[in-house]
């Protein structure tokens, strides 16, 4: 990680060993998803985004499921017995030893921390020469959280867990999020001194703060501005809550950048979507990760824009349209009840109601190419692989299996016959 032009070593340790019994699932809690992305994968991607050099994941219960999601992107250590957060970090000692720099402690079930928040934590820890920097929050109702104990000068003395707090400590509103940035060498030293002297008989990582303070080492904190960032997932209701929080956060960012979202409560825009100014998103629309949409577009109700789509400027996507891995040129209209998959559509085209690209032959996905200024009539089946040239017209109700050259009209249907009605 580069801080003030200097390369600094930063490691991430991600806690991912818990059982997650409250999810009532045969799957690890950590592989449940928000917007098609596993909780633990979100945390790993966050660690990468802030520029950490190494990522160590502490796994335990259903660890093979976690490893299947993360693959070789991280190093793994095992916590066979769940003896507390301090014990979990102890399992990563072999990767911490011999390193100089910082280690951030993250949790696989706390997936929506902003990159900027984590960067601020790390930068403050380096610049202020703090041996431990905590991410804290102010809660009006802090029940259940560890309380931050400060001295008269405002310095952090210790963290007291809810079950170990006295009546005065329970009145404190500043709480510990569990996210830390530690000096690696001093963390290793403090871990040697940890004792399970608490009601739970566990090794608390929070006790490291008191150990460092007793040595006269400087500690500090960053108070998170948005408390929703440190929310964790323990059950299905909390999973839905975090999905809702992320939806509103993403939608708000797009609206700040000039996108009109008619109903933010029913619009689901996934991560890393780019949308141009003055584009209007109608209700009940889903736009998947990585989609690019240009300016002055109109995305209709119940539209489903899936992965791999690039949509030009002044494009209209109408009601009940599904698009997947498709490029659409400027000023093209895709009005309603249409499926375009694995396609490339040119500029100034009109795609008629009920049109589909038949992109799957049972084994492979095949591509449909439609040129500029093509007019595709209603209820057309384009059986891929097929190319429709520029300035073409495809008659309504046609099933097109062969290429249509530029400037031609394609008709693939039986001639109409009118017969007398039987009485």
Image: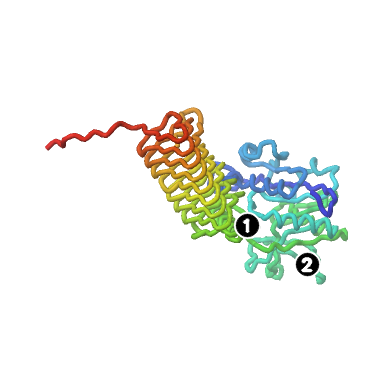
Q: For the point 77% across and 44% down, which residue is it?
A: 53
Q: Give the percent coordinates (x, y) of residue 380.
A: 39, 38
Q: Which mark is residue 231?
A: 1
Q: Give the percent coordinates (x, y) of residue 213.
A: 84, 60
The type of colouring in the image is rainbow
Residue 21 in view (yes/no): no
| Outermost residue toward the right in this view | 216
Q: Give the percent coordinates (x, y) of residue 73.
A: 70, 39
Q: Secondary structure at mark 1?
A: loop
Work out whether 363 lies above or below 343.
Answer: above
Horizontal relation, residue 262 to residue 380: left or right = right
Q: Say which residue label 2 marks.
A: 150
Question: How many other residues sit within 10 Å of disc 1, few (<14), some (14-19) or many (≥20)?
Answer: some
- Nearer-the-camera pick, 154 or 100: 100
- Which image quarter is the C terminus in? top left
Q: Give the percent coordinates (x, y) of residue 90.
A: 77, 45
Which image quadrant for residue 351?
top left
Tell which circle, 1 or 2, labels the residue nearer the N-terminal end: 2
- Nearer-the-camera pick, 419 or 339: 419
Q: Secondary structure at mark 2?
A: strand
| Outermost residue toward the front in this view | 407
């Amino acid at each position: 990680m580069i801080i003030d032009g200097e390369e600094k070593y930063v490691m991430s340790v991600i806690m991912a060993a818990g059982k997650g019994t409250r999810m009532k699932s045969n799957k690890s809690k950590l592989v449940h998803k928000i917007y098609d992305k596993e909780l633990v994968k979100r945390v790993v991607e966050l660690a990468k985004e802030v520029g950490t050099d190494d990522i160590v994941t502490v796994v335990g219960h259903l660890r093979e499921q976690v490893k299947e999601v993360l693959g070789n992107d991280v190093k793994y250590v095992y916590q066979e017995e769940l003896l507390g957060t301090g014990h979990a970090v102890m399992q990563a000692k072999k990767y911490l030893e011999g390193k100089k720099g910082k280690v951030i402690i993250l949790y696989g079930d706390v997936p929506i921390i902003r990159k900027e928040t984590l960067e601020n934590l790390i930068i403050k820890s380096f610049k202020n020469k703090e041996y431990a920097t905590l991410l804290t929050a102010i809660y009006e109702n802090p029940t259940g959280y560890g309380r931050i104990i400060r001295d008269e000068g405002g310095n952090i003395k210790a963290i007291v867990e809810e079950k170990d707090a006295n009546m005065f400590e329970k009145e404190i509103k500043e709480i510990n999020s569990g996210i830390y940035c530690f000096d690696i060498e001093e963390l290793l030293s403090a871990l040697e001194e940890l004792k399970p002297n608490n009601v739970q008989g566990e090794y608390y990582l929070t006790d490291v703060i008191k150990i460092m303070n007793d040595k006269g080492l400087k500690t500090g904190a960053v108070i998170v501005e948005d408390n929703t960032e440190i929310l964790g997932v323990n059950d299905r209701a909390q999973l839905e809550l975090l999905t809702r929080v992320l939806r509103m956060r993403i939608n708000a960012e797009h609206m700040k950048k000039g996108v009109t979202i008619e109903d933010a409560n029913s619009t689901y825009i996934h991560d890393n979507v780019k949308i141009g100014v003055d584009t209007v998103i109608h209700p009940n629309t889903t736009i998947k990760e990585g989609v690019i949409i240009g300016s002055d577009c109109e995305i209709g109700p119940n539209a489903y824009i899936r992965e791999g789509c690039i949509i030009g400027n002044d494009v209209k996507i109408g009601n009940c349209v599904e698009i997947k891995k498709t490029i659409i040129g400027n000023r093209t209209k895709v009005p309603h009840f249409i499926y375009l998959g694995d396609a490339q559509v040119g500029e100034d085209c009109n795609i008629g109601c009920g049109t589909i690209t038949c992109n799957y032959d049972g084994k492979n996905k095949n591509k449909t190419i439609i040129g500029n200024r093509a007019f595709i009539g209603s209820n057309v089946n384009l059986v891929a692989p097929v190319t429709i040239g520029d300035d073409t017209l495809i008659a309504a109700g046609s099933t097109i299996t062969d290429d249509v050259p530029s400037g031609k009209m394609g008709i693939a249907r039986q001639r109409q016959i009118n017969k007398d009605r039987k009485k």
